[in-house]
Image: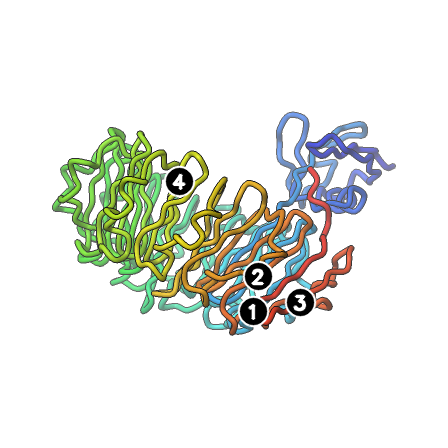
Amino acid sequence: MSISIAVALLSGRSRVITAHPDSTVDDLRLQAQLSLKVGLERLVTETGVILQGKSTLRASHVQSGATLTAHVRQSQLVSSALAFALLRSDGTVVSWGNAVDGGDSSAVQDELKDVNQIQSTLHAFAAIRSDGSVVAWGKMDDGGLVPSAVGAELVNVTAIQASSRAFAAIKADGSVVTWGNPRYGGDCRAQKEHLKEVTQIQASRDTFGASFAAVRADGRVVTWGVADAGGDSSAVQEQLRQVQRIQATRFGGSYAAIRADGTVVTWGNRASGGDSSGVQAQLYEVEHIQATESAFAAIRKDGCVVTWGNPHDGGDSTEVQDQLMDVTHVQATSHAFAAIRADGSVVTWGSESCGGDSSEVQDQLYGVTMIQAASLAFAAIRRDGSVVTWGTPDAGGDSRHVQEQLKNVTGIQASREGVRCAFAALRADGSVVTWGDPSSGGYCRMVGDQLFDVQEIQGTENCFAAIRGDGGVVTWGNGDFAPDGPTAEELLQDVQQVPTSTIGSDGSVVTWGRPLSSEG
């Protein structure tokens, strides 16, 4: 006997779906997805219970006449070093860019359906499907290939974290599965018995080795990977209790853990922030920690900032310490910090050429609400939507030639590859303004007329991609990257409307065409 169930979007649009009581929740969700013509991520009962996909309607106590709320799957744009992967609202995925870095997903395209989340290393992607299974592609040794022995364990996955060359997946039961380059945390077998009830994982992303640090439900921490890159926390293991959050330096292999009482525990490379003994007495009531490549900055509850690690990368803030009061947020380039105070003013320190010296624009740094960072420069958005930049001039620190266009800015993204950096600012009208190294996305004139009604921008190491309101994607930046963009035939797979693509004379790629509706 069939039952009738109403499935409704948050917008109010709904459909009545007929199903058998022994059908699974996933079966019902997919039926509703086809009927509503929109990608659905999950179904929720009237009492707020999220229904488990593999459970039957009978076991989930879903009866005829019930009304379920459907959460729409949002589009997601993710980048590796030189490739993009776009999760469309219908749950399918399209990738483009350098094939070695995950730009070619043709080998697993048939499996890239009903995807909810994508994560990336520098050279590979991993996608979680609604049933908890995982699909990976890209450079095989860096996570693009799941070994058969590991694949059997990759079920009921709820989240994935990535180091530079390996993945770590958290399963519904709190256990962890890893794959990829062992030197970058791809092998956790030595700690397998301790990886239970894991709630979150943080990763270091060093060039010559990396590690992972997992926080368990009981507040204990488990680490693995290269010992010198933070993979060995045995020296402070007894202190790693009641841990709530962990931050890692961008390189250098150091971690800082915030405990429930606001104290901090550090480990890893001592010269890169792994040793906080010099400031330990000041590390109390800490609420947030930010990191450069080899230094940390902690914000306390009273708004004061404490720094340690490599002094050249911001680990020494003594020259501005009397100004570091009432701080609400700290942002970091590779070698410098910028702090926003409650009154909207900004304090900087660290490497002068990388944004640690803002003296030339200090009189403009007022009313600041947000700061974005590239590797060598900062960009601050003020309350009136204007933008102030500083740092290495040709790496995004000098925006004078586009200053008149930088109005009503709502968000900024950065590409960040060593000394080649650029910014892309999204304005309230959906237009885009770029500056910085032209080869890293600082020049978008060839695709400027396609950059309208932009909803989101994502950057790789040296290029950008923008999603428009009509579902179209526009990419620009490194000429070696862009010609590998998606062709019309590739984007046509599983898309309801025919897309097209053009390649500009600067090697940029423009694609457009709507996948499934994003209503909801």
**Numbered mark located on residue 502 in the image:** 3
Residue 230 screen position, x and y as percent: 28, 57
Q: Nearer the viewer, residue 62 or 134?
A: 134
User: Is residue 448 at least partly visible in the picture?
Assistant: yes
Q: What is the secondary structure assignment of the residue under circle 2?
A: strand
Question: Against 380, is 91 above or below?
Answer: below
**Mark 4 crowdedness (10 Å alpha carbons): few <14, some 14-19, many ≥20:** many
> What residue do we see at 27% from left, 37% from top?
299
> What residue do we see at 61% from left, 66% from top?
509
Alpha carbon of mark 3 to alpha carbon of mark 1: how far? 11 Å
Tag in front: 3 or 1 = 3
Q: What is the secondary structure assignment of the residue under circle 1?
A: helix
| Amino acid type of the residue tagged 3 in the rendering | Thr
* First in residue order: circle 2 vs circle 1: 2
Q: Is residue 383 left or right of residue 236?
A: right
Alpha carbon of mark 4 to alpha carbon of mark 1: how far? 30 Å
Alpha carbon of mark 4 to alpha carbon of mark 3: how far? 35 Å
**Mark 3 crowdedness (10 Å alpha carbons): few <14, some 14-19, many ≥20:** some
Residue 64 screen position, x and y as percent: 81, 30
Alpha carbon of mark 2 to alpha carbon of mark 4: how far? 25 Å
